[in-house]
Image: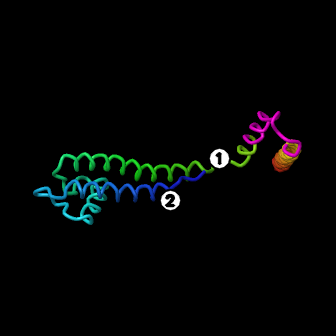
């Protein structure tokens, strides 16, 4: 399980540039604005959603609306990507290949009428190998328990 960090980062950068352009054009020609260039609008776009209010406030109503949408959307994407990545890292051990194998087998069993002969043979081989593997694990577990009980009785 992987999070789409690169896709979200790319989307965040594109939206940042678009919203900054919106702020710049919304503020162009406004009196008393501190956002007088596209570079300052880009800075505003980062400062607005990543800090506690140190960004210069837009002075036009449309710029304020664009800025508010950017702050919410940018923050959700930015912090959401971080939370999703950290969560995926800690959830990875819970997603075992055996679970995926069982899900695949269950799906194929549900689609049994639609499978070709080759697919049915592959399903049979996979199931047989899974059964052999499980029997092997069971035998190993029993041997380990048996050897532990011998050690306990010798003491």
For residue 94, side relative to residue 52 (left or right): right
Q: Position of residue 150 (x, y in %)?
A: 86, 48
Within 10 Å of the Cα at label 1, are there few (<14), some (14-19), or many (20+) other Cα atoms?
few
Q: Is 99 within the magenta?
A: no
Tell me the residue that label 1 is attached to: 95
Tell me the residue that label 2 is attached to: 6
Q: Position of residue 137 (x, y in %)?
A: 82, 47
* Residue at 78% from the left image edge and 40% from the top image edge: 105
For residue 91, side relative to residue 13 (left or right): right
The magenta stretch is: 103-119
Residue 149 appears in view: no
Q: How is the image coloured?
A: rainbow
Closest to the observer, 19 or 82: 19
Residues at marks 1 and 2 touching, judged by CB atoms closer than 8 Å: no
Q: Is 116 within the magenta?
A: yes
* Residue at 22% from the left image edge and 47% from the top image edge: 62
For residue 124, side relative to residue 32 (left or right): right
Closest to the observer, 148 or 107: 107
Q: Position of residue 45 (x, y in %)?
A: 29, 57
Q: Secondary structure at mark 1?
A: loop
All told, the count of numbered labels is: 2
Which secondary structure dominates the residues rendered in magenta?
A: helix
Residue 67 appears in view: yes
Closest to the observer, 146 or 100: 100
* Residue at 14% from the left image edge and 56% from the top image edge: 30
Residue 13: name its quadrant: bottom left
User: In whole angstroms, how far apart are the C-alphas of marks 1 and 2?
Assistant: 22 Å
Q: Nearer the viewer, mark 1 or mark 2?
A: 2
* Residue at 36% from the left image edge and 47% from the top image edge: 73
Q: Secondary structure at mark 2?
A: helix
Residue 51: name its quadrant: bottom left
């Amino acid at each position: 399980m992987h999070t789409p960090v690169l896709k979200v980062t790319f989307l965040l950068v594109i939206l940042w540039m678009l919203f900054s352009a919106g702020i710049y054009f919304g503020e162009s020609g406004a009196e008393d604005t501190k956002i007088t260039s596209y570079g300052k609008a880009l800075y505003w776009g980062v400062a607005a959603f990543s800090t506690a209010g140190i960004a210069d406030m837009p002075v036009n109503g449309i710029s304020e609306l664009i800025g508010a949408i950017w702050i919410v959307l940018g923050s959700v994407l930015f912090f959401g990507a971080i939370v999703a990545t950290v969560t995926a890292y800690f959830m990875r051990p819970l997603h075992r290949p055996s679970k995926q194998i069982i899900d695949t087998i269950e799906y194929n069993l549900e689609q049994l009428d639609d499978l070709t002969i080759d697919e049915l043979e592959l399903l049979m081989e996979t199931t047989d190998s899974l059964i052999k593997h499980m029997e092997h694990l069971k035998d190993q577990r029993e041997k380990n328990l048996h050897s532990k009980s011998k050690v306990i009785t010798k003491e």
